[in-house]
Image (spheres, helix red, strand yellow):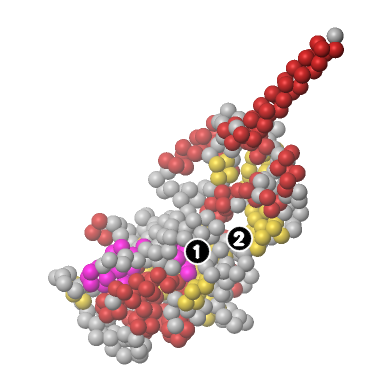
Protein backbone atom coordinates (compact mmCIF):
# COMPACT_ATOMS: atom_id res chain seq x y z
CA UNK A 1 0.00 0.00 0.00
CA UNK A 2 2.86 2.34 0.88
CA UNK A 3 4.36 1.72 -2.56
CA UNK A 4 1.15 2.93 -4.31
CA UNK A 5 0.98 6.01 -2.10
CA UNK A 6 4.61 6.78 -2.94
CA UNK A 7 3.95 6.42 -6.68
CA UNK A 8 0.88 8.65 -6.45
CA UNK A 9 2.89 11.25 -4.51
CA UNK A 10 5.68 11.19 -7.12
CA UNK A 11 3.13 11.50 -9.94
CA UNK A 12 1.46 14.47 -8.20
CA UNK A 13 4.86 16.09 -7.67
CA UNK A 14 5.62 15.66 -11.38
CA UNK A 15 2.27 17.23 -12.29
CA UNK A 16 2.99 20.15 -9.96
CA UNK A 17 6.45 20.55 -11.49
CA UNK A 18 4.90 20.51 -14.97
CA UNK A 19 2.48 23.23 -13.93
CA UNK A 20 5.31 25.33 -12.54
CA UNK A 21 7.38 24.86 -15.69
CA UNK A 22 4.40 25.82 -17.86
CA UNK A 23 3.69 28.86 -15.70
CA UNK A 24 7.34 29.88 -16.05
CA UNK A 25 7.13 29.39 -19.80
CA UNK A 26 3.95 31.48 -20.09
CA UNK A 27 4.91 34.28 -17.69
CA UNK A 28 8.60 34.64 -18.54
CA UNK A 29 9.61 32.94 -21.78
CA UNK A 30 6.44 33.71 -23.76
CA UNK A 31 5.30 36.83 -21.89
CA UNK A 32 6.34 39.20 -24.65
CA UNK A 33 4.40 37.18 -27.22
CA UNK A 34 1.25 37.20 -25.12
CA UNK A 35 1.60 40.86 -24.17
CA UNK A 36 1.92 41.78 -27.84
CA UNK A 37 -0.92 39.59 -29.03
CA UNK A 38 -3.75 41.75 -30.46
CA UNK A 39 -6.29 39.49 -28.76
CA UNK A 40 -4.85 40.30 -25.31
CA UNK A 41 -6.78 43.31 -23.97
CA UNK A 42 -5.33 43.24 -20.46
CA UNK A 43 -2.86 46.04 -21.19
CA UNK A 44 -5.55 48.25 -22.73
CA UNK A 45 -7.95 47.55 -19.85
CA UNK A 46 -5.22 48.41 -17.33
CA UNK A 47 -4.14 51.48 -19.33
CA UNK A 48 -7.63 52.98 -19.36
CA UNK A 49 -8.66 51.57 -15.99
CA UNK A 50 -7.53 54.68 -14.13
CA UNK A 51 -7.53 58.42 -14.89
CA UNK A 52 -4.66 59.62 -17.03
CA UNK A 53 -2.28 62.24 -15.62
CA UNK A 54 -2.80 65.84 -16.70
CA UNK A 55 -0.99 68.40 -18.83
CA UNK A 56 -0.81 71.76 -17.05
CA UNK A 57 -0.61 75.30 -18.45
CA UNK A 58 -0.14 78.18 -16.05
CA UNK A 59 -0.53 75.79 -13.12
CA UNK A 60 -3.97 74.55 -14.22
CA UNK A 61 -4.82 71.34 -16.10
CA UNK A 62 -5.98 71.63 -19.70
CA UNK A 63 -6.74 67.90 -19.83
CA UNK A 64 -8.90 65.54 -17.80
CA UNK A 65 -10.42 62.05 -17.74
CA UNK A 66 -14.08 60.98 -18.02
CA UNK A 67 -15.45 57.79 -16.46
CA UNK A 68 -17.45 56.04 -19.19
CA UNK A 69 -18.36 52.95 -17.16
CA UNK A 70 -17.20 50.80 -20.09
CA UNK A 71 -14.50 48.11 -20.10
CA UNK A 72 -12.02 50.75 -21.29
CA UNK A 73 -13.16 52.92 -18.44
CA UNK A 74 -11.57 56.37 -18.76
CA UNK A 75 -11.56 58.60 -21.84
CA UNK A 76 -9.42 61.71 -22.28
CA UNK A 77 -11.05 65.14 -22.10
CA UNK A 78 -9.62 68.52 -23.13
CA UNK A 79 -10.25 72.06 -21.94
CA UNK A 80 -9.98 74.59 -24.80
CA UNK A 81 -8.99 71.70 -27.06
CA UNK A 82 -8.32 73.66 -30.28
CA UNK A 83 -6.23 76.24 -28.41
CA UNK A 84 -3.83 73.69 -26.95
CA UNK A 85 -4.04 70.86 -29.52
CA UNK A 86 -0.64 71.70 -31.12
CA UNK A 87 0.89 71.15 -27.68
CA UNK A 88 -1.14 68.35 -26.09
CA UNK A 89 -1.88 66.36 -29.23
CA UNK A 90 -4.51 63.64 -28.69
CA UNK A 91 -4.83 60.50 -26.59
CA UNK A 92 -7.19 58.06 -28.27
CA UNK A 93 -8.26 54.55 -27.27
CA UNK A 94 -8.38 53.73 -30.98
CA UNK A 95 -5.65 55.82 -32.65
CA UNK A 96 -2.93 56.13 -30.02
CA UNK A 97 -1.25 59.38 -28.99
CA UNK A 98 0.53 62.41 -30.48
CA UNK A 99 2.73 65.35 -29.37
CA UNK A 100 2.99 65.73 -25.56
CA UNK A 101 0.46 62.95 -25.02
CA UNK A 102 2.86 60.70 -26.93
CA UNK A 103 6.23 62.04 -25.76
CA UNK A 104 5.16 61.83 -22.08
CA UNK A 105 2.87 58.80 -22.43
CA UNK A 106 4.70 56.59 -19.92
CA UNK A 107 4.43 59.22 -17.22
CA UNK A 108 0.85 60.23 -18.00
CA UNK A 109 -0.37 56.60 -18.11
CA UNK A 110 1.47 55.60 -14.92
CA UNK A 111 4.00 53.11 -16.33
CA UNK A 112 7.08 55.31 -15.88
CA UNK A 113 9.32 53.55 -13.29
CA UNK A 114 10.06 56.96 -11.73
CA UNK A 115 6.45 57.07 -10.46
CA UNK A 116 6.67 53.81 -8.52
CA UNK A 117 7.60 53.89 -4.84
CA UNK A 118 8.50 50.17 -4.95
CA UNK A 119 9.37 49.34 -8.59
CA UNK A 120 10.12 45.63 -7.96
CA UNK A 121 6.83 45.09 -6.15
CA UNK A 122 4.90 46.82 -8.93
CA UNK A 123 6.70 44.69 -11.49
CA UNK A 124 5.73 41.49 -9.66
CA UNK A 125 2.12 42.50 -9.03
CA UNK A 126 1.74 44.33 -12.34
CA UNK A 127 0.35 47.22 -10.33
CA UNK A 128 0.27 50.68 -11.84
CA UNK A 129 0.71 53.89 -9.85
CA UNK A 130 -1.47 56.92 -10.69
CA UNK A 131 -0.41 58.79 -13.80
CA UNK A 132 1.89 61.76 -13.32
CA UNK A 133 1.42 65.34 -14.51
CA UNK A 134 3.31 67.36 -17.13
CA UNK A 135 3.89 71.04 -16.34
CA UNK A 136 4.46 73.03 -19.52
CA UNK A 137 6.36 76.28 -20.09
CA UNK A 138 3.43 77.92 -21.91
CA UNK A 139 2.23 81.41 -21.02
CA UNK A 140 -1.58 81.34 -20.98
CA UNK A 141 -1.94 84.92 -22.18
CA UNK A 142 0.57 84.52 -25.01
CA UNK A 143 -1.03 81.29 -26.21
CA UNK A 144 -4.48 82.83 -26.33
CA UNK A 145 -3.24 86.06 -27.94
CA UNK A 146 -1.59 84.05 -30.71
CA UNK A 147 -4.67 81.93 -31.34
CA UNK A 148 -7.07 84.86 -31.34
CA UNK A 149 -4.65 86.94 -33.42
CA UNK A 150 -4.70 84.44 -36.24
CA UNK A 151 -8.51 84.69 -36.10
CA UNK A 152 -9.12 81.58 -38.17
CA UNK A 153 -6.50 82.41 -40.82
CA UNK A 154 -4.22 79.53 -41.75
CA UNK A 155 -0.85 79.94 -40.09
CA UNK A 156 1.25 79.46 -36.97
CA UNK A 157 2.90 81.30 -34.09
CA UNK A 158 5.87 80.33 -31.92
CA UNK A 159 7.15 82.37 -28.98
CA UNK A 160 10.15 81.66 -26.76
CA UNK A 161 11.99 83.20 -23.82
CA UNK A 162 15.39 84.17 -25.30
CA UNK A 163 17.51 83.65 -22.18
CA UNK A 164 16.24 80.13 -21.44
CA UNK A 165 14.61 78.65 -24.56
CA UNK A 166 11.30 78.15 -22.73
CA UNK A 167 8.47 77.94 -25.27
CA UNK A 168 5.81 80.49 -24.30
CA UNK A 169 3.34 79.94 -27.14
CA UNK A 170 2.87 77.31 -29.83
CA UNK A 171 -0.22 77.81 -31.99
CA UNK A 172 -1.35 76.32 -35.28
CA UNK A 173 -4.52 77.24 -37.19
CA UNK A 174 -6.78 75.66 -38.31
CA UNK A 175 -6.93 73.45 -35.25
CA UNK A 176 -9.28 70.78 -33.87
CA UNK A 177 -10.71 69.43 -30.62
CA UNK A 178 -8.69 66.31 -29.60
CA UNK A 179 -11.57 65.04 -27.45
CA UNK A 180 -13.48 63.88 -30.55
CA UNK A 181 -10.81 61.18 -30.98
CA UNK A 182 -10.66 60.01 -27.35
CA UNK A 183 -13.06 57.07 -27.54
CA UNK A 184 -13.26 53.95 -29.68
CA UNK A 185 -16.79 54.26 -31.03
CA UNK A 186 -18.19 55.10 -34.44
CA UNK A 187 -18.13 58.84 -33.66
CA UNK A 188 -14.36 58.72 -33.11
CA UNK A 189 -13.95 56.79 -36.36
CA UNK A 190 -15.94 59.41 -38.28
CA UNK A 191 -13.98 62.25 -36.67
CA UNK A 192 -10.68 60.56 -37.59
CA UNK A 193 -11.75 60.19 -41.23
CA UNK A 194 -13.02 63.78 -41.37
CA UNK A 195 -9.87 65.30 -39.86
CA UNK A 196 -7.51 63.28 -42.04
CA UNK A 197 -9.54 64.09 -45.15
CA UNK A 198 -9.68 67.84 -44.50
CA UNK A 199 -7.53 69.64 -47.12
CA UNK A 200 -6.65 72.32 -44.53
CA UNK A 201 -4.94 69.65 -42.36
CA UNK A 202 -6.13 70.74 -38.91
CA UNK A 203 -4.04 68.05 -37.19
CA UNK A 204 -0.82 69.37 -38.76
CA UNK A 205 1.20 71.33 -36.20
CA UNK A 206 2.39 74.13 -38.47
CA UNK A 207 4.51 75.71 -35.72
CA UNK A 208 6.94 72.78 -35.50
CA UNK A 209 6.07 70.25 -38.22
CA UNK A 210 5.68 72.51 -41.27
CA UNK A 211 8.57 74.31 -42.99
CA UNK A 212 8.12 77.41 -45.12
CA UNK A 213 10.36 79.64 -47.22
CA UNK A 214 11.20 82.28 -44.58
CA UNK A 215 11.51 85.10 -47.11
CA UNK A 216 13.01 88.33 -45.87
CA UNK A 217 13.03 87.24 -42.21
CA UNK A 218 16.07 85.14 -43.19
CA UNK A 219 17.91 88.40 -43.85
CA UNK A 220 18.61 88.43 -40.09
CA UNK A 221 20.82 85.37 -40.65
CA UNK A 222 22.44 86.86 -43.76
CA UNK A 223 23.16 90.14 -41.95
CA UNK A 224 24.70 88.21 -39.04
CA UNK A 225 26.96 86.29 -41.43
CA UNK A 226 28.03 89.48 -43.22
CA UNK A 227 28.82 91.31 -39.97
CA UNK A 228 30.66 88.35 -38.43
CA UNK A 229 32.73 87.86 -41.61
CA UNK A 230 33.66 91.54 -41.81
CA UNK A 231 31.99 91.95 -45.21
CA UNK A 232 30.05 94.78 -43.55
CA UNK A 233 31.88 96.95 -41.02
CA UNK A 234 29.78 100.11 -41.09
CA UNK A 235 25.97 99.97 -40.99
CA UNK A 236 25.71 103.31 -42.78
CA UNK A 237 28.27 102.86 -45.56
CA UNK A 238 26.98 102.22 -49.12
CA UNK A 239 27.17 98.52 -50.02
CA UNK A 240 27.92 98.68 -53.76
CA UNK A 241 24.79 96.72 -54.53
CA UNK A 242 23.22 97.44 -57.93
CA UNK A 243 19.46 97.49 -58.32
CA UNK A 244 18.38 95.46 -60.16
CA UNK A 245 21.01 92.83 -59.37
CA UNK A 246 21.86 90.23 -62.00
CA UNK A 247 22.21 86.81 -60.41
CA UNK A 248 25.78 85.53 -60.93
CA UNK A 249 26.22 83.36 -64.04
CA UNK A 250 22.70 84.07 -65.30
CA UNK A 251 20.75 86.64 -67.29
CA UNK A 252 18.10 86.85 -64.55
CA UNK A 253 17.76 90.15 -62.72
CA UNK A 254 16.56 90.41 -59.13
CA UNK A 255 14.47 93.47 -58.27
CA UNK A 256 12.99 95.11 -55.18
CA UNK A 257 9.46 95.96 -54.13
CA UNK A 258 10.35 99.65 -53.71
CA UNK A 259 12.87 102.23 -54.84
CA UNK A 260 16.05 103.47 -53.19
CA UNK A 261 17.82 100.12 -52.80
CA UNK A 262 20.71 100.78 -55.18
CA UNK A 263 23.96 100.73 -53.13
CA UNK A 264 21.85 101.11 -49.98
CA UNK A 265 23.71 100.87 -46.64
CA UNK A 266 22.89 97.85 -44.51
CA UNK A 267 20.79 99.96 -42.12
CA UNK A 268 18.49 101.22 -44.88
CA UNK A 269 18.49 97.88 -46.72
CA UNK A 270 17.42 96.03 -43.56
CA UNK A 271 14.80 98.63 -42.69
CA UNK A 272 13.20 98.51 -46.15
CA UNK A 273 14.05 94.87 -46.90
CA UNK A 274 16.10 95.35 -50.08
CA UNK A 275 16.41 91.99 -51.85
CA UNK A 276 19.27 93.11 -54.09
CA UNK A 277 21.50 94.15 -51.18
CA UNK A 278 21.06 90.91 -49.24
CA UNK A 279 21.33 88.64 -52.27
CA UNK A 280 24.70 90.21 -53.11
CA UNK A 281 25.75 90.08 -49.46
CA UNK A 282 25.12 86.33 -49.40
CA UNK A 283 27.31 85.88 -52.47
CA UNK A 284 30.04 88.10 -50.98
CA UNK A 285 30.00 86.16 -47.70
CA UNK A 286 30.26 82.88 -49.59
CA UNK A 287 28.59 79.51 -49.28
CA UNK A 288 30.87 78.14 -46.54
CA UNK A 289 30.34 81.03 -44.16
CA UNK A 290 26.63 81.33 -44.93
CA UNK A 291 26.20 77.61 -44.27
CA UNK A 292 28.17 77.82 -41.03
CA UNK A 293 26.11 80.73 -39.73
CA UNK A 294 22.80 79.10 -40.69
CA UNK A 295 23.89 75.90 -38.91
CA UNK A 296 24.83 77.89 -35.79
CA UNK A 297 21.29 79.32 -35.70
CA UNK A 298 19.83 75.79 -35.89
CA UNK A 299 19.31 75.11 -39.59
CA UNK A 300 20.05 71.55 -40.78
CA UNK A 301 19.85 70.22 -37.20
CA UNK A 302 17.92 66.95 -37.35
CA UNK A 303 17.94 66.33 -33.57
CA UNK A 304 15.63 69.08 -32.26
CA UNK A 305 12.98 67.76 -29.84
CA UNK A 306 10.78 69.81 -27.50
CA UNK A 307 10.27 66.91 -26.40
CA UNK A 308 8.40 65.75 -29.54
CA UNK A 309 10.37 65.97 -32.80
CA UNK A 310 10.57 69.23 -34.74
CA UNK A 311 10.82 69.27 -38.55
CA UNK A 312 14.32 70.13 -39.78
CA UNK A 313 14.78 73.67 -41.03
CA UNK A 314 17.13 73.64 -44.01
CA UNK A 315 19.74 75.78 -45.70
CA UNK A 316 21.14 74.07 -48.80
CA UNK A 317 24.91 73.57 -48.59
CA UNK A 318 25.44 72.64 -52.28
CA UNK A 319 24.51 75.83 -54.12
CA UNK A 320 25.94 77.72 -57.05
CA UNK A 321 26.33 81.49 -56.66
CA UNK A 322 22.95 82.37 -58.18
CA UNK A 323 21.18 79.87 -55.92
CA UNK A 324 23.15 81.21 -52.95
CA UNK A 325 21.91 84.72 -53.74
CA UNK A 326 18.28 83.55 -53.67
CA UNK A 327 18.81 81.39 -50.58
CA UNK A 328 20.27 84.40 -48.75
CA UNK A 329 16.93 86.21 -49.02
CA UNK A 330 15.02 83.19 -47.74
CA UNK A 331 13.95 81.77 -51.08
CA UNK A 332 15.08 78.87 -53.33
CA UNK A 333 15.59 75.81 -51.04
CA UNK A 334 15.75 77.66 -47.72
CA UNK A 335 12.98 76.36 -45.41
CA UNK A 336 12.18 77.06 -41.77
CA UNK A 337 9.62 76.23 -39.12
CA UNK A 338 8.09 79.12 -37.17
CA UNK A 339 9.85 77.77 -34.07
CA UNK A 340 13.21 77.97 -35.85
CA UNK A 341 12.60 81.59 -36.85
CA UNK A 342 11.58 82.42 -33.27
CA UNK A 343 14.96 81.01 -32.22
CA UNK A 344 16.70 83.24 -34.79
CA UNK A 345 15.04 86.29 -33.26
CA UNK A 346 15.81 84.99 -29.76
CA UNK A 347 19.51 84.69 -30.62
CA UNK A 348 19.62 88.36 -31.56
CA UNK A 349 17.86 89.26 -28.31
CA UNK A 350 20.16 87.03 -26.23
CA UNK A 351 23.53 88.45 -27.24
CA UNK A 352 24.04 85.97 -30.06
CA UNK A 353 23.43 82.85 -27.98
CA UNK A 354 20.90 80.21 -29.04
CA UNK A 355 19.25 78.28 -26.24
CA UNK A 356 17.76 74.90 -27.09
CA UNK A 357 13.93 75.26 -26.98
CA UNK A 358 11.85 73.18 -24.57
CA UNK A 359 8.17 72.82 -23.71
CA UNK A 360 8.14 70.78 -20.47
CA UNK A 361 9.14 72.67 -17.30
CA UNK A 362 8.91 69.61 -15.06
CA UNK A 363 7.02 66.38 -14.50
CA UNK A 364 5.37 65.46 -11.20
CA UNK A 365 3.60 62.66 -9.39
CA UNK A 366 -0.17 62.95 -8.91
CA UNK A 367 0.39 64.55 -5.48
CA UNK A 368 2.73 67.21 -6.88
CA UNK A 369 6.15 65.81 -5.96
CA UNK A 370 8.67 66.53 -8.73
CA UNK A 371 9.80 63.58 -10.83
CA UNK A 372 12.11 65.46 -13.23
CA UNK A 373 12.88 69.04 -14.26
CA UNK A 374 13.97 70.55 -17.55
CA UNK A 375 17.50 71.12 -16.25
CA UNK A 376 20.13 73.19 -18.05
CA UNK A 377 19.77 73.48 -21.81
CA UNK A 378 22.42 73.35 -24.50
CA UNK A 379 23.66 76.71 -25.73
CA UNK A 380 25.67 77.72 -28.78
CA UNK A 381 26.99 81.00 -30.12
CA UNK A 382 25.30 81.91 -33.40
CA UNK A 383 27.16 85.22 -33.84
CA UNK A 384 29.50 87.56 -32.03
CA UNK A 385 27.89 89.56 -29.18
CA UNK A 386 28.87 92.74 -31.02
CA UNK A 387 27.00 91.51 -34.10
CA UNK A 388 23.92 90.75 -31.98
CA UNK A 389 24.01 94.29 -30.58
CA UNK A 390 24.06 95.79 -34.06
CA UNK A 391 21.27 93.50 -35.25
CA UNK A 392 19.13 94.54 -32.28
CA UNK A 393 19.68 98.11 -33.40
CA UNK A 394 18.65 97.26 -36.96
CA UNK A 395 15.55 95.36 -35.83
CA UNK A 396 14.50 98.27 -33.62
CA UNK A 397 14.81 100.59 -36.64
CA UNK A 398 12.38 98.33 -38.56
CA UNK A 399 9.74 98.73 -35.86
CA UNK A 400 10.39 102.39 -35.15
CA UNK A 401 10.38 103.69 -38.71
CA UNK A 402 10.39 100.82 -41.21
CA UNK A 403 8.09 98.04 -42.40
CA UNK A 404 7.28 96.71 -38.91
CA UNK A 405 5.76 99.75 -37.25
CA UNK A 406 2.53 97.89 -36.44
CA UNK A 407 4.50 95.82 -33.89
CA UNK A 408 5.43 98.78 -31.70
CA UNK A 409 4.42 98.61 -28.01
CA UNK A 410 4.27 101.76 -25.94
CA UNK A 411 6.89 101.80 -23.20
CA UNK A 412 8.79 98.76 -24.53
CA UNK A 413 11.79 98.18 -26.77
CA UNK A 414 10.69 96.12 -29.76
CA UNK A 415 12.76 94.82 -32.66
CA UNK A 416 11.41 93.05 -35.71
CA UNK A 417 11.82 91.96 -39.30
CA UNK A 418 9.07 91.54 -41.86
CA UNK A 419 9.02 88.96 -44.62
CA UNK A 420 6.87 88.12 -47.62
CA UNK A 421 7.82 84.67 -48.94
CA UNK A 422 7.03 83.67 -52.50
CA UNK A 423 6.14 80.05 -53.27
CA UNK A 424 4.43 77.86 -55.84
CA UNK A 425 5.29 77.24 -59.47
CA UNK A 426 6.65 80.47 -60.85
CA UNK A 427 5.89 82.10 -57.47
CA UNK A 428 2.19 81.89 -58.39
CA UNK A 429 0.99 81.07 -54.88
CA UNK A 430 -0.34 83.69 -52.50
CA UNK A 431 2.77 84.83 -50.57
CA UNK A 432 3.29 83.82 -46.95
CA UNK A 433 3.37 86.77 -44.56
CA UNK A 434 6.14 86.54 -41.92
CA UNK A 435 7.19 88.57 -38.93
CA UNK A 436 9.94 87.80 -36.41
CA UNK A 437 10.49 89.98 -33.38
CA UNK A 438 11.58 90.39 -29.77
CA UNK A 439 10.45 92.69 -26.97
CA UNK A 440 11.91 94.08 -23.77
CA UNK A 441 9.72 95.64 -21.09
CA UNK A 442 10.58 98.92 -19.42
CA UNK A 443 11.54 97.12 -16.20
CA UNK A 444 13.37 94.22 -17.86
CA UNK A 445 17.15 94.03 -18.11
CA UNK A 446 16.97 91.90 -21.26
CA UNK A 447 14.32 90.97 -23.86
CA UNK A 448 11.84 88.54 -22.34
CA UNK A 449 10.12 87.23 -25.46
CA UNK A 450 10.92 86.42 -29.09
CA UNK A 451 8.17 85.61 -31.58
CA UNK A 452 7.74 84.27 -35.11
CA UNK A 453 4.45 84.50 -37.00
CA UNK A 454 3.60 83.08 -40.41
CA UNK A 455 0.24 83.53 -42.14
CA UNK A 456 -0.53 81.43 -45.23
CA UNK A 457 -4.04 82.62 -45.92
CA UNK A 458 -4.90 81.85 -49.54
CA UNK A 459 -8.20 83.72 -49.23
CA UNK A 460 -6.46 87.10 -48.94
CA UNK A 461 -5.81 89.49 -51.80
CA UNK A 462 -2.27 88.83 -53.07
CA UNK A 463 -1.41 92.53 -53.05
CA UNK A 464 -2.46 92.90 -49.41
CA UNK A 465 -0.16 90.17 -48.06
CA UNK A 466 2.74 91.74 -46.16
CA UNK A 467 4.54 90.73 -43.01
CA UNK A 468 4.07 94.19 -41.53
CA UNK A 469 0.37 94.37 -42.33
CA UNK A 470 -0.75 90.78 -41.59
CA UNK A 471 1.76 89.11 -39.25
CA UNK A 472 3.23 91.96 -37.18
CA UNK A 473 -0.01 92.82 -35.30
CA UNK A 474 -0.27 89.20 -34.18
CA UNK A 475 3.32 89.25 -32.91
CA UNK A 476 2.60 92.51 -31.10
CA UNK A 477 -0.36 90.95 -29.25
CA UNK A 478 1.73 87.96 -28.17
CA UNK A 479 4.65 90.11 -27.00
CA UNK A 480 2.33 92.45 -25.10
CA UNK A 481 0.68 89.48 -23.37
CA UNK A 482 4.07 88.27 -22.12
CA UNK A 483 5.25 91.73 -21.03
CA UNK A 484 2.08 92.35 -19.03
CA UNK A 485 1.76 88.88 -17.48
CA separation, marks 2 and 1? 15 Å
Locate residue 116 relative to residue 401 in the image: left or right: right
Locate residue 243 relative to residue 288 in the image: left or right: left
Residue furthest front as drawn:
3
List x then y, in percent, for residue 125: 74, 39
Residue at image mark 2: 360
Q: Is residue 455 visible?
A: no
Bin the neighbour count of mark 1 within 10 Å (Cα to Cα): few under 14, some 14-19, many 20 and up. many
In terms of secondary structure, where does tag 1 sit? strand
Locate residue 466 relative to residue 95 in the image: left or right: left
Q: Residue at x 56, y 63 (%)?
A: 358
Choose mark 2 or mark 1, whichever is in front: 2
Q: How many marks?
A: 2
Residue 224 falls in image quadrant: bottom left
List x then y, in percent, for residue 164: 57, 71
Locate residue 242 relative to residue 202 in the image: left or right: left
Q: Is residue 193 visible?
A: yes
In terms of secondary structure, where does tag 2 sit? strand
Residue at image mark 1: 158
Q: Is residue 323 magenta?
A: yes
Give the magenta range. 320-343
Q: Is residue 110 magenta?
A: no
Amino acid sequence: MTRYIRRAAVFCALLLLALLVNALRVQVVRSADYDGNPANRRESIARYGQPRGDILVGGAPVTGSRDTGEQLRYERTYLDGPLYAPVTGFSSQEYGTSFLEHAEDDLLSGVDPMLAGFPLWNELTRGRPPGGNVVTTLDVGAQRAAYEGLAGRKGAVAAVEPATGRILALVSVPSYDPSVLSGNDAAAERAWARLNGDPDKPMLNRAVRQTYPPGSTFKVVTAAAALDAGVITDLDRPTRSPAPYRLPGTTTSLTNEGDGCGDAPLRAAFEWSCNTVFAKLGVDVGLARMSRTARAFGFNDTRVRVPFPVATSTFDTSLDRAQLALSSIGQYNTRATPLQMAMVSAAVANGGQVREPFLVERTTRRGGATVATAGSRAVRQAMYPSTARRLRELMEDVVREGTGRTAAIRGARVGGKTGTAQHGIGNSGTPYAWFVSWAQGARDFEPSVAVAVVVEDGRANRGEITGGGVAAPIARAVMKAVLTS
